[in-house]
Image: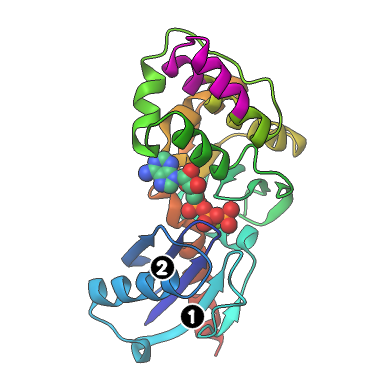
Amino acid sequence: MYTMGIDVGSASSKVVILKDGKDIIASEVVQVGTGSTGPARALELAYQKSGLTREDISFLVATGYGRFAFDDADKQISEISCHAKGIYFLVPSARTIIDIGGQDAKAIRLESNGSIKQFFMNDKCAAGTGRFLDVMARVLETTLDEMALLDEQATETAPISSTCTVFAESEVISSLSNGVSRNNIIKGVHLSVASRACGLAYRGGLEMDVVMTGGVAQNAGVVRAVAGVLKKEVIVAPNPQTTGALGAALFAYEAAQKR
Ligand SMILES: Nc1ncnc2c1ncn2[C@@H]1O[C@H](COP(=O)(O)OP(=O)(O)OP(=O)(O)O)[C@@H](O)[C@H]1O
Ligand SMILES: [Mg+2]
């Protein structure tokens, strides 16, 4: 039996196809979020990869910010539930999940059976999210892929004092014109995002293992900064951008079995 999860986020669209609730046979990401083109392209890639069509999919669960705008799903489930489900499947030892996406950051506390104990979210402000990193990459004339490498070459951290993305952008521009090293600024940018995420994680009472997920978990600079702030080891979920879609496909499998 094949089931599908689609995670229509603010920054990207992710699709996972599962065989019999355990084997991932397609896991696709398109860096275009809510709207029609991102989800449509992600679906097309997943069907191409698996050789399946919509008729082969027994149940389809949509999650993410844009889940209600996607009209081909059998059911919609929140992103918090789907991330928890996906992470527990991949890393059953996870008790604290940090998900940093394009427009929000979340910390989720799991019980040992995978159920959600508590969650905390920052969806009011771009600071501490992928959006902040996207803005900074542009100002610093670098790419998301390159940021972690430049962070590694930093000699010290040039901290960002502004808590607002717009002010932080001006602060970075002024630091650059004052000759502060770009690499050191990048390290400061990563620390700024990490500190906010850790603030959320602490609110639930930090419990090990800590697992990072969402697109920003692909940035090793942010992951290192999170581990540094928490003074704990941090596990990065395999293929972290797709864990919400994986959770949705797992929920779809459970629903298909009940049907
Ligand atoms: N290759 C990469 N390296 C580093 N960071 C990346 C990479 N690709 C994407 N990102 C970061 O991931 C962010 C998007 O994360 P993700 O796809 O989880 O967001 P989303 O689920 O669409 O958003 P949200 O959950 O907030 O609605 C981007 O803003 C970017 O900063
Ligand atoms: Mg997301």
Q: Position of residue 214 (x, y in %)?
A: 50, 48
- Residue segment shown in magenta: 170-187
Residue 252 against residue 132 in the figure, above or below = below
Quarter holding residue 13: bottom left
State the SS at label 2.
Answer: strand
Of tags 2 and 1, which is closer to the observer?
2
Instruction: Identify the residue shown where x is 57% and y is 68%.
Output: 63
Numbered badge on residue 60: 1
Question: Which quadrant is home to the N terminus?
Answer: bottom left
Instruction: Identify the residue shown where x is 41% and y is 57%.
Output: 31
Q: Residues within 10 Å of mark 2 (few under 14, many from 20)?
A: many
Q: Position of residue 50 (x, y in %)?
A: 25, 74
Q: Position of residue 208 (x, y in %)?
A: 60, 34
Q: Is residue 189 visible?
A: yes
Q: Residue furthest front?
A: 177
Residue 23 against residue 207 in the figure, above or below = below
Residue closer to the observer: 200 or 29: 29
Residue 234 included in the magenta stretch of the image: no
Mark found first going from the N terminus, 2 or 1: 2
- Its colouring scheme is rainbow
User: Looking at mark 2, is its residue's CB closer than 8 Å to ligand 1?
Assistant: no
Predominant secondary structure in magenta?
Answer: helix
Residue 173 included in the magenta stretch of the image: yes
Q: Which residue is mark 2?
A: 15
Instruction: Identify the residue shown where x is 50% and y is 85%.
Output: 72
Residue 153 against residue 169 in the figure, above or below = above
Residue closer to the observer: 45 or 20: 45
Q: Position of residue 64 (x, y in %)?
A: 58, 64
Q: Amino acid at mark 2?
A: Val
Left/right of residue 144 with respect to residue 175 in the rendered view: left
